[in-house]
């Protein structure tokens, strides 16, 4: 799926630490590529002067946003790389230790007990760290093919490191010409084709996300419509989903209020953020933030899920950190939540480590 000229350009970018993104929109097979000599501060949503790729990390202590302008062409990178300057080394790195169950289980029990009192939810993630001989380009190529319905990207900046993503979750799809916005509430997980009504735990988890998004958009003066509930599949699992449409003016404030949604953070949002920082022992970096493209006529941003961070070990191996999480509420069971997070990482893990 990733053509040879894009593969070559990615290789050059990784060799010289040049910021880049190669991505495909949902249902599209064409891989688009952009790169820049350096990243910049993201432009204001209300004053977009150039096209580019936007990254906002969940852990804003590392960065409040990175913008890759569409500056370098494929020809600039592949015809003659002797003119290219080596960029900055990545400032963040993968970690060697996976999340152990004996650490994860008490976290879930503690948070679930907390939510029996307040009725909220907190999204707690686990991390799988694995070394592999499979290169990130080959991982991305296979992963992109497996999930054509998702927004798929492989990107690198010195501030974020190298990431591979296939995310089903829209944060913002906004047309600046007719001021129409699309988003979704995506929460609740079960095995695909389970059939029947969703259990109360997942319905409650999902309803908090839907209510939060709708209330924010209406408080921003938008006219909001909500679809009937449906299922959205990813690999061997499916999620409960409401598609949400709205009309009105989109501002940077609106995006900041929506991100992170309770689907990746929790609710109440401020309290959930504090619990995540206290309980999780690994940094999230980009996981749970958002990524996507911005143009003068359109803003298309996606939640950074179903992802892995990759780092060259310089011994023929790459280290991958995979992230998967779940919404913890008063009815959560540690083993079920552990397995749910594992299901979310399974298709990517099988590509990275096919002999597991």
Image (cartoon, grey):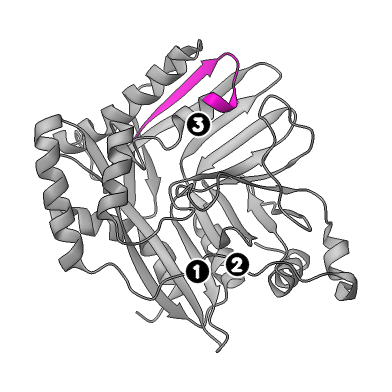
Position of 266 relative to 148 (above/below): above
Q: Secondary structure at mark 1?
A: loop
Residue 26 seen in render: no
Task: Look at the image and tell me in which quarter the N terminus lies.
Answer: bottom right
The stretch of residues the image draws in magenta is 240-253
- For residue 239: magenta? no
Which residue is more in the foreground, 144 or 192? 144
Q: CA distance from mark 1 to mark 2?
A: 7 Å
N-terminal of the pair, mark 1 or mark 3, is 1
Numbered-mark total: 3
Looking at the rendering, which quadrant does residue 104 occupy? bottom left
Which residue is more in the foreground, 123 or 29? 123
Q: Secondary structure at mark 2?
A: loop
Looking at the rendering, which quadrant does residue 196 occupy? top left
The percent position of residue 61, horizontal first and vertical second, equals: 48, 50
Asked if marks 1 and 2 touch (Cβ < 8 Å), the reply is yes
Residue 256's disc number: 3
Q: Secondary structure at mark 3?
A: helix
Position of 78 relative to 195 (above/below): below
Residue 90's disc number: 2
Position of 35 relative to 121 (above/below): below
Residue under circle 1? Answer: 93
């Amino acid at each position: 799926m990733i053509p040879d000229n894009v593969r070559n350009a990615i290789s050059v970018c990784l060799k010289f630490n040049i910021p880049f993104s190669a991505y495909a929109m949902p249902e599209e097979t064409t891989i688009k590529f952009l790169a820049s000599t350096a990243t910049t501060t993201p432009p204001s949503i209300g004053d977009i002067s150039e096209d580019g790729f936007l990254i906002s990390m969940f852990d804003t202590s590392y960065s409040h946003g990175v913008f890759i302008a569409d500056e370098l062409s494929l020809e600039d990178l592949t015809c003659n790389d002797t003119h290219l300057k080596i960029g900055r080394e990545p400032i963040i790195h993968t970690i060697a230790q996976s999340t152990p169950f004996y650490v994860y289980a008490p976290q879930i029990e503690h948070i679930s007990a907390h939510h029996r009192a307040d009725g909220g939810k907190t999204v707690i993630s686990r991390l799988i760290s694995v070394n592999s001989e499979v290169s990130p380009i080959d991982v991305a190529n296979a992963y992109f093919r497996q999930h054509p319905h998702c927004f798929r990207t492989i990107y690198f900046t010195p501030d974020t490191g190298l990431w591979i993503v296939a995310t089903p979750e829209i944060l913002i799809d906004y047309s600046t010409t007719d001021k129409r916005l699309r988003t979704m509430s995506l929460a609740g997980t079960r095995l695909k084709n389970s059939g029947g009504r969703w259990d109360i735990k997942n319905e409650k988890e999902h309803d908090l996300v839907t209510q939060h998004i709708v209330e924010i958009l209406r408080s921003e003066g938008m006219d909001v419509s909500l679809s009937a509930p449906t299922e959205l599949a990813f690999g061997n699992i499916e999620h409960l989903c409401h598609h949400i449409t709205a009309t009105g003016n989109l501002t940077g404030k609106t995006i900041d209020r929506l991100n992170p949604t309770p689907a990746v953070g929790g609710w109440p949002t401020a309290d959930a953020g504090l619990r995540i920082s206290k309980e999780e022992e690994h940094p999230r970096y980009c996981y749970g933030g958002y990524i996507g493209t911005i143009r003068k006529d359109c803003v298309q941003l996606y939640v950074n899920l179903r992802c892995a961070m990759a780092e060259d070990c310089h011994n023929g191996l790459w280290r991958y950190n995979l992230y998967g999480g779940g919404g913890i509420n008063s009815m959560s069971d540690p083993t079920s939540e552990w397995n749910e997070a594992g299901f979310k990482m399974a298709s990517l893990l099988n590509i990275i480590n096919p002999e597991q």
